[in-house]
Image (tube, rainbow, N blue to C red):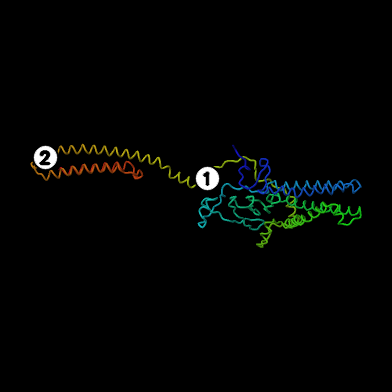
Amino acid sequence: MEKRVYEVWKGSNKFFLGGRLIFGPDARSLPVTLLLISVPSIIFCIFVARHLRHRFSPYNAGYGIMVVAVVFTIYVLIILFLTSARDPGIIPRNSRPPEEEPHHDSSVPAQARNRHTPGRQFPRTKEVMVNGMQVRVKYCSTCMLYRPPRCSHCSICNNCVERFDHHCPWVGQCIGLRNYRFFFMFVSSTTLLCIYVFSMSALYIKVLMDDNHRTVWEAMKESPPSVVLMAYCFIALWFVGGLTGFHLYLIGTNQTTYENFRHRADNRINIFDRGCPSNFDEIFCTKLNPSKNNFRALVQEEVPRPTEEAKAEDVGGDTHPKIEVDLENRQDLLKISEQHNIEEGIDLSKISRRQNDEENDSRESNDPLRSTLEADSIMGINHRASLTMTMIRSDPEPSSYGNSSSEIAADSHTNSTVTIKEAGRLFE
């Protein structure tokens, strides 16, 4: 069964609705953020806004307080969803190293080199031109690519993200090129919601004081939820309000959170700053590029590159057929040797008969010394032939037949011919 991209995704992201929604690995913190926003709003509508409905008689303006709170809360939750459930600008990782010329680094262990780029080591950095200035980009060994400018690898999501700002645990997602706009809108909207709830709760305390001419403490005792909401919003404003101000500064100078801390430490010049109006226009008015990842697309199987072991096997071949061929050649050699021994025996018998005839006709047939030497020569020839046969049969190593069968057969035939010639010279 064919799989889709999100099913074999190598990053740490979590997908829902068949790959239509993408979250970070810490998406479990998202419900906590939802509760921190929705629960105070619900308490405000029940214990504060409900009592202010009839306090402003012209056109029943008191109902507007509750409507604004509800709409504003829904708006903040939608912006939160758009921030956390979309691709932040993930750059697709390569399945193979880039096709640039690598250099070999003998100082890197072999296991580390074979992990991603077998036998090769790519330069860690290279120079590219941005706005007329050289910018150094780094090679990501995890994604096997040279990261574009302003791109960084998120160790939590395990992805390279364009214009990486930071990884926000409150939204459970990386903040990058495609969701930074929504992230700022979420933070700034949450700040405004806190200010609104704090102001309306303080207004309700003021209304209670004016109705019965009470003091502040008496009014606060009559409406404890208002006091809790004011304290909660005051504390939250220190976080979301400070974060909103910080990102306003970053947008005005065209920086990211990551670049701000890094450039401050390295005293680098910001080459991306085009002026405050242009910087704000770049963030809020430019069209967002579509995602570079189609998470619902079917995975296309790639032909794997042959490994070093496979290449070695292709070059060396299988050794079992070679052993079988050697065994067959060995049997053929045994047959050839036996045939030569039989022919050699026939030649020896002829020589022996000729010797007997010559002995009968010779005058020196009674010489015992000559007879003894001739008998010893014949026995030596037979012993040498049998020894050659034994050596061929007793060889235990098939690989020892490194020479071809024709060479061994030629040697056996040569040995047999030499033996017959020696026997002939003895009887001349």
> Residue 237 is drawn in which quadrant?
bottom right
Q: How far apart are labels 1 and 2 at the CA level?
A: 81 Å
Determine the residue positioned at 53% across, 44% down: 304
> In the image shown, does 201 or 316 lie closer to the viewer?
201
Q: Residue 102 carries which label?
A: none
Q: Which element carries disc 2, helix, strand or loop?
A: helix
Determine the residue positioned at 62% across, 42% down: 7
Question: For mark 2, does the 10 Å Cα neighbourhood hold few (<14), some (14 to 19), or many (20 or more) residues?
Answer: some
Coordinates of residue 149 in the picture (x, y in percent): 65, 54
First in sequence: mark 1 or mark 2?
A: 1
Coordinates of residue 224 in the picture (x, y in percent): 83, 52
Is 122 displayed left or right of 259 in the figure? Answer: left
Q: Tell me: residue 384, above or below residue 241.
A: above
Q: Amino acid type of disc 2?
A: Glu
Coordinates of residue 293 in the picture (x, y in percent): 65, 45
Q: Which mark is residue 359?
A: 2
Q: Which element carries disc 1, helix, strand or loop?
A: loop
Q: Amino acid type of disc 1?
A: Arg
Question: For mark 1, does the 10 Å Cα neighbourhood hold few (<14), some (14 to 19), or many (20 or more) residues?
Answer: few
Question: Where does the C terminus fall, quadrant-wise?
Answer: top left
Total marks in image: 2
Coordinates of residue 248 in the picture (x, y in percent): 75, 56
Is 227 displayed left or right of 298 in the figure? Answer: right
> In the image shown, does 258 or 311 lie closer to the viewer?
258
> In the image shown, does 221 or 391 lie closer to the viewer?
221
Q: Do the residues labelled 1 and 2 touch (CB within 8 Å)?
A: no
Q: Mark 1 points at which residue?
A: 305
Question: Where does the N terminus fall, quadrant-wise?
Answer: top right
Is 415 displayed left or right of 44 in the figure? Answer: left
